[in-house]
Image (cartoon, grey):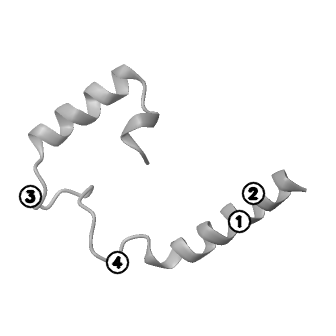
Amino acid sequence: MSYFDFSPTQQNKELSYAAEHPIGTGTLRDAAFFDGAGTALFEGLWSGVRQADQVG
């Protein structure tokens, strides 16, 4: 999820949450080192398929 995809209201919510819950406080939204490692390959392949479809 990208910061730039949010509406201004959602940006404010995320920024206030980040200020209240700094990284490393043990909240459920902290990212671990290997988060997304299992799905990154499939997301990359799917991205390539979608771009190939646009070219063709």
1 or 4: mark nearer the eye? 1
What is the C-alpha distance between the residues marked 2 and 3? 39 Å
Query: In this rendering, which labeled residue sits more in front, label 4 or label 2?
Result: 2
Left or right of 34 in this view: 26 = left
Residue drawn at x 36%, y 21% as measured from the top left: 8
Q: For the residue carrying disc 4, how many other residues have a C-alpha within 10 Å: few (<14), some (14-19), or many (20+)? A: few
> Which residue sits at x=75%, y=57%?
51
CB within 8 Å, label 1 to label 2: yes
Local crowd at mark 2 within 10 Å, few (<14), some, or many (≥20)?
A: few
Query: In the structure shown, which secondary structural element does the residue marked by tag 1 occupy?
Result: helix
Q: Earlier in the sequence, mark 3 or mark 4?
A: 3
Q: Where in the figure is residue 19, as x and y percent of width and height?
A: 11, 38
Closer to the camera in the image, 32 or 44? 44
Q: Which mark is residue 51?
A: 2
Q: Residue at x 41, y 45 (%)?
A: 2
Whether 27 is drawn above or below 44: the answer is: above
- Tag 3: amino acid: Thr
